[in-house]
Image (cartoon, helix red, strand yellow):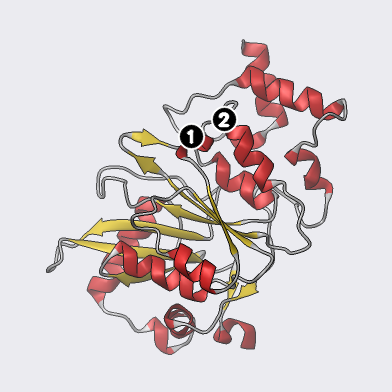
Amino acid sequence: MQYVQQYVLAKYPEYCNGLVEEGDKIDLYTLCLTDESSANGKEKSPRRESSSPSFRSSNSELGKILLEPSRLLDILTKKTSYQGNFISIPEIQVRNRALQQCGVSEEEYLVVFRVTLKEAMMMIGECYPFFRGNYYMTILGEDYDCIREFVSFKDSKVIAAPESWLDLRIKGSQLSQYFRRKSKHSPKGLFAYPAYVEETRYSMHWISEAHRNSWHVLLDASGLDAGKERFALALHRPDFVLCTVDNTHAQPSKITCLLVRKQSFETAASSAN
């Protein structure tokens, strides 16, 4: 078993340095079989795609895309401008708590505050450039996933995947197959999934695999117990992150935060520079 662990960690660096959360159960033997079958030509491994210039690392850079005109784009443009540096102390404190909770830095992410989770998701649906030919693959609950409405309106396609696909064993192979679907568009679309559901914490591995196969990722971390648990997202870098932080100043008691990765999207201000 020690040999198998050393072999997998050597072949798949994303499983070391704390990338696999404690409690995640990885079927190392299945991973080895998948890699061996790829070598025999039976299945193309996502790791082999890293030789392409578009897939230089486990956190592949898809290149910046321009968000569609929306409230979110206006806010991000202001935040990246000189005037956006002047913010209140309470806003700085909440922003820092959100970044610390997700384990990322302000150099990499911009933080936008919303009252509700639904409002934050509507902003993503408005701004993300869905079009005929790309996809929105979601494992979020249909009862609050309002992004689907925007996808249909923009003639894109919704792929509603079951939560069981987040299993790292056999069921997860279905999700991997969808990631590797051929498409003439890059990025292929947006993949959204929950990080935490009913005491089940799902692996961050899916962020790296989605990036390797030219997908943007929305991670819903709002199920995390604010102030008590943290994520280590610095090595995964999802493109959007939803989380909540405690509000110690006034009502409401919790603030919904939308984290947007700077390296994934262009704003009017950043493109002008």
Q: Examine the rendering and report whether any part of residue 157 can be seen.
A: yes
37 w.r.t. 63: above or below? above
| 190 lies left or right of 219 | right
Quarter of the view holding residue 134: bottom right
Q: Position of residue 36 (x, y in %)?
A: 79, 23
Disc 2 packing (10 Å; few <14; some 14–19; many ≥20): some
Location of the C terminus (image quadrant) = bottom right
Quarter of the N terminus within the rendering: top right
Q: Are marks 2 and 1 in contact (CB under 8 Å)?
A: yes
In this view, the residue farthest toward the left is: 250
User: Which percent across, then down, holds residue 99?
Assistant: 38, 58
- Total labels: the figure holds 2
- In percent of width and height, residue 71 lies at 42, 82
| Image point (31%, 34%), residue name | 199
Secondary structure of the residue carrying tag 2 is loop
In this view of the protein, which residue sits in the foreground, 242 or 70? Answer: 70
Residue highlighted by disc 2: 171
Q: Nearer the viewer, residue 93 or 153?
A: 153
Left or right: 253 as drawn, with respect to 144: left
Amino acid at dot 2: Lys
User: What residue lies at 65% left-to-right and 27% top-to-bottom?
Assistant: 9
Tell me the residue at 31%/46% (across/down).
224
Left or right: residue 137 compared with residue 101: right
**Number of the label disc, if any, that sits on residue 164:** 1
Extreme residue toward the right, this view: 41
Residue at the top extreme of this rendering: 1
237 versus 77 height, above or below: above
Residue 268 higher or lower than 39, as above or below: below
